């Protein structure tokens, strides 16, 4: 199984989701079953590390995000990944437009829908605030990733 998390710049929300999911998969010894990655819909930060505030927030919880380098979503991602979780409404609609084959639309999912089914809304973007704003976003993303990994464990574990 291959999971891709997508946000706008690939420096805050989607890399946190990627790192948290991988961390949880490793804890449960399921990481050999799932490939996890993240990308952004714009190219503002290609090659950059995750936001320093995101790195510090995840490190407080024993999750290393220093390896991350931002990248833009590619057409091959749309074909290769089984599930694509979008972190924001504008991102969701951009990825939806990029999907060339209608039969692939089932891959595209709202991340928040994992937490509240039917809730098509954005994960708050902490980039615009101060470092304190990253903790509640981390907690929200962690909860969603935990549910995703619980489902993987149920289905494949």
Image (spheres, helix red, strand yellow):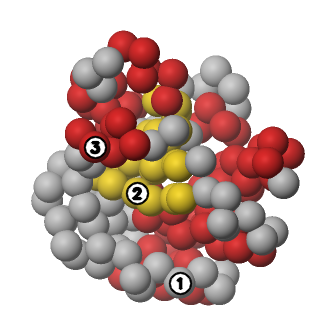
Q: Earlier in the sequence, mark 3 or mark 2?
A: 2
Q: Is residue 95 above or below residue 103?
A: below
Q: CA distance from mark 3 to mark 2?
A: 13 Å
Q: Secondary structure at mark 3?
A: helix
| Closer to us: 50 or 71 | 71
Q: x, y (%) of residue 152? A: 75, 48
Q: Residue at the spot x=24%, y=28% of the render?
A: 98
Q: x, y (%) of residue 49? A: 29, 78
Relative to 130, 69 lies left or right: left
Q: Earlier in the sequence, mark 1 or mark 3?
A: 1
Q: Secondary structure at mark 2?
A: strand
Give neighbour class at mark 2: few <14, some 14-19, many 20+ (Cα, 10 Å). many
Q: x, y (%) of residue 96? A: 33, 25
| Closer to us: 50 or 28 | 28
Q: Residue at the spot x=66%, y=67% of the render?
A: 31
Relative to 31, 45 lies left or right: left
- Report the residue marked by disc 2: 38
Query: What label sits on residue 76 in the rendered view?
Result: 3
Query: What label sits on residue 64 in the rendered view?
Result: 1
């Amino acid at each position: 199984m291959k999971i891709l998390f997508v946000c706008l710049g690939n420096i805050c929300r989607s890399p946190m989701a990627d790192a948290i999911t991988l961390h949880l998969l490793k804890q449960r010894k399921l990481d050999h079953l799932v490939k996890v990655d993240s990308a952004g819909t714009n190219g503002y930060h290609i090659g950059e590390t995750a936001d320093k505030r995101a790195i510090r927030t995840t490190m407080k919880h024993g999750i290393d995000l220093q390896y991350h380098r931002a990248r833009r979503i590619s057409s091959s991602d749309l074909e290769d990944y089984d599930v694509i979780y979008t972190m924001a409404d504008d991102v969701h609609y951009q990825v939806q437009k990029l999907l060339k084959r209608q039969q692939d639309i089932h891959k595209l999912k709202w991340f928040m829908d994992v937490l509240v089914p039917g809730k098509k809304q954005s994960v708050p973007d902490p980039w615009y605030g101060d470092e304190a704003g990253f903790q509640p976003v981390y907690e929200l993303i962690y909860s969603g990733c935990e549910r995703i990994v619980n489902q993987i464990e149920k289905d494949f574990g």
